[in-house]
Image (cartoon, rainbow, N blue to C red):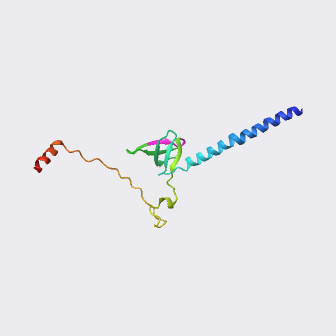
């Protein structure tokens, strides 16, 4: 009978060790990831599990719509497809200040400018400009 109790004791010991070393940390990590995905907001920059980096422009219950690239391509993504938040839109005000001497209520606006190509002129227009200058 003591031998049976020792075997049960070792079994219980290994189950407790497995719980403390493997299961508990994994559940904690899953809770953190789930809370990060639940806290996604418009304006957050994210990286998907596929490695795509984009900015959230709209959130829904189970999906987010992100904007990607210079052409501002938009596509819908399941929330579970978000790997991590690169830059949160809920930054502290000190990180948003443009100059340190300004008031705390100042927030700089990020304005994206896109350089548009100039209109191509026809070769006949170029030739006429050259002949007019002579």
Tell me the magenta residue range.
75-80
Q: Nearer the viewer, residue 102 or 79?
A: 102
- As drawn, the residue found furthest toward the right would be 1
Q: Is residue 20 magenta?
A: no
Residue 66 picture location, percent across and down: 45, 45
Direction from residue 19 to residue 111 in the image, left or right: left
Quadrant of the rendered structure where residue 6 is?
top right
Q: Looking at the image, which residue sits at the far front?
A: 134
Measured as percent of width and height from the top left, residue 91 is found at 51, 56
User: Could one spot residue 66 in this view of the protein?
Assistant: yes
Q: Is residue 114 left or right of residue 44?
A: left
Viewer-closest of 110 and 81: 110
Q: Main secondary structure of the magenta part?
A: strand
Residue 77 magenta:
yes
> What residue sits 13% from the left and 47% below the top?
130
Placement of 6 over or under 125, stated as above or below:
above
- Where residue 67 appears, as percent x and y from the top left, is 43, 46
* Residue 61 visible in the picture: no
- Which quadrant holds residue 14? top right
Query: Which quadrant, please, contains the N terminus?
Result: top right
Left or right of 20 in this view: 32? left
Q: Position of residue 19 (x, y in %)?
A: 72, 40
How many marks can you see?
Answer: 0
Q: Residue at x 62, y 46 (%)?
A: 31
């Amino acid at each position: 009978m003591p031998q049976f109790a020792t075997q049960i004791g070792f079994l219980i010991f290994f189950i407790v060790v497995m719980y403390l070393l493997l299961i508990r940390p994994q559940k904690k990590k899953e809770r953190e990831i789930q809370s990060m995905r639940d806290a996604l907001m418009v304006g957050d920059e994210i990286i998907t599990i596929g490695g795509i980096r984009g900015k959230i422009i709209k959130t829904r219950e189970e999906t987010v719509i992100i904007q990607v690239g210079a052409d501002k391509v938009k596509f819908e993504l399941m929330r579970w497809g978000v790997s991590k938040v690169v830059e949160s839109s809920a930054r502290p005000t000190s990180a948003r200040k443009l100059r340190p001497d300004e008031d705390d209520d100042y927030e700089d606006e990020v304005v994206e400018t896109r350089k548009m190509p100039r209109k191509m002129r026809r070769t006949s227009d170029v030739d006429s400009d050259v002949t007019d200058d002579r």
